[in-house]
Amino acid sequence: MRHIPEDELHAYLDQGLSRSQCVEIESHLAACPSCQAARDGIAALRDRTTALLSKLAPPRAFPPEFESLRRRAASQVSARRRRAHLAAWAASLVAAVGLGWTASFLLRPHEPVARLAARQVATLPVSTRAAAPADDRLTRRDTTTIQPTRRRPAVKAVAAKSAIALPRVLPPPALELSSIDIPRSDVGFELDGMWRTMSWAGAQAEAGDQLPHIDGLPVVQVQVQTSEQGKQPLMVVAQQLASGEVIRTIEGPTSDVSHLLARRAMSDPMPTMTLGDSAPRDSVPSDSDHTDRTMAMQRGDRMLVITGALPSDSLLAMIRRLNAEMRSK
Amino acid sequence: MTDELEQLYQTTYTAVVRFLYRKVWDAERAEDLAQEVFVRALTHRPEKPRAWVFAVAANLARDEARAAVRRKRHLTLLKADPVAQPTVEPAADVLVEHDERVASVQQALSTLTPRDREILLLWDAGLSYPEIATQTGLALGAVGTTLARARRRLVDAHDRQHTSEGNHAAHS
């Protein structure tokens, strides 16, 4: 007669076996003192485990009224709808950058025009290394007549209807967009003044649909600086891309945001930040593809900024992803 | 009207908080996340709410842990810093002793493989074998094997630690 293996005894005591299996085990146990001893040992082991784990319990938590969760769920649904506007805002910003890319890719053979495109839409510093493969791809595409990229319809839908109507005519900038070069600092994103680090849920409860973020990316951290009463807070939401790079979306009063960016740039001995600079800039050779890129947009007295150490590839990936998301909506 | 979800909330909220606490090691955060789980359940209305709730809790905790790793905060959370322990107040002794007991179980739990730990915690949270199997993708027959190993390892790791700590304490 075969003895009962240890794992089956665990399953038996855990009531994880079928009725017929139980019957089988019980009839064996009744006749087998050694398996009885094994069972008792395992029962004691189970109790030990439960007792040990019970020490790892948080202080007794009193659940909040279920009604309050219901209200939260209801408000989240409506906030999600309202948030769609903000998301569209952020996405159109990025889409406009995408437009800049698309335009300059399509028009690269005509250098002066491309430069103009860069001037009008956005100047994204591209390291020479990153630019080279893009050119290759373009040349290949050139020989087979330029096909509008898949991205175009989405971009068009989001940014401006007149966007890429004629290939030679440059799209008017859909949004006031500027690219800012901030040197990468290894210390990370240091914030001065009184900041509160909040959980995503907590920040959402407080700021509701005002939280600047990009839908679909996991949120790493939310930092909020409350200013004087009546004034809207300055918010920094850190999110992570699939590549592991963290990008930050900052929203707040223009003065505060530019101050934040300026201060950050100043922490570097050689500040190269050029806020609102729309003049064409030759790409600066950098020793890393991961340079800090910042895109800023101003509307009224508010400023929205996306910043992070992004390789040009992942910036493109982000744009594609956002465009795909917009398409699916 | 009390719906099914509300009943589940009343009966499992504490278990969900505990489950999350053992992953994020922050009671307040565990409660926040647990509430978030139920808020999500209210909007999603899952078919099998109990299993769903724990699956979402596990996901939230995983996201949380990734973020924590990035912030390199987990080291300070897992390692009890003896220097930082309060030693002046007499009442602190009790607290320290309690903390040490907790830390030793925490330490023992950390020696388990992520999968074994997950299954042990799900079991301890009250999930059945079929529920655990569904959530973790483990074969139903393997749940008992895993639990057997996980229990054995937890207790062994804890006891081993205690004998060495006992020697240490006797020395000082």
Image: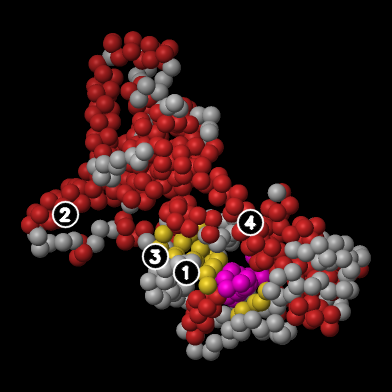
Mark 3 closeness class: few <14, some 14–19, many ≥20 residues within 10 Å = few
Camera-nearest residue between A286 and A319: A319
Residue A291 lies in magenta, yes or no? Answer: yes
Residue highlighted by disc 2: B96
**Label 4 residue SS:** helix
Q: Is residue A226 visible?
A: yes
Residue highlighted by disc 4: A85
Numbered disc in front, either 1 or 3: 1
Q: What is the chain letter for disc 2?
A: B
Which residue type does callout 1 highlight?
Lys
Residue highlighted by disc 1: A231
Label 1 with label 3: CB-CB less than 8 Å: no
Real-space Cα separation, disc 1 to disc 2, in angstroms: 45 Å
1 or 4: tag closer to the N-terminus: 4
At x 42%, y 13%, the residue is A19
**Label 3 residue SS:** strand
Label 1 with label 2: CB-CB less than 8 Å: no
Q: What range of the chain is rendered magenta?
A: A290-314
Q: Is residue A185 visible?
A: no
Real-space Cα separation, disc 1 to disc 3, in angstroms: 16 Å
Numbered disc in front, either 1 or 4: 1
Mark 1 closeness class: few <14, some 14–19, many ≥20 residues within 10 Å = few
**Left or right: B24 in relation to A133:** left
| Residue A30 position by quadrant | top left
| Residue A156 position by quadrant | bottom right
Real-space Cα separation, disc 1 to disc 4, in angstroms: 21 Å
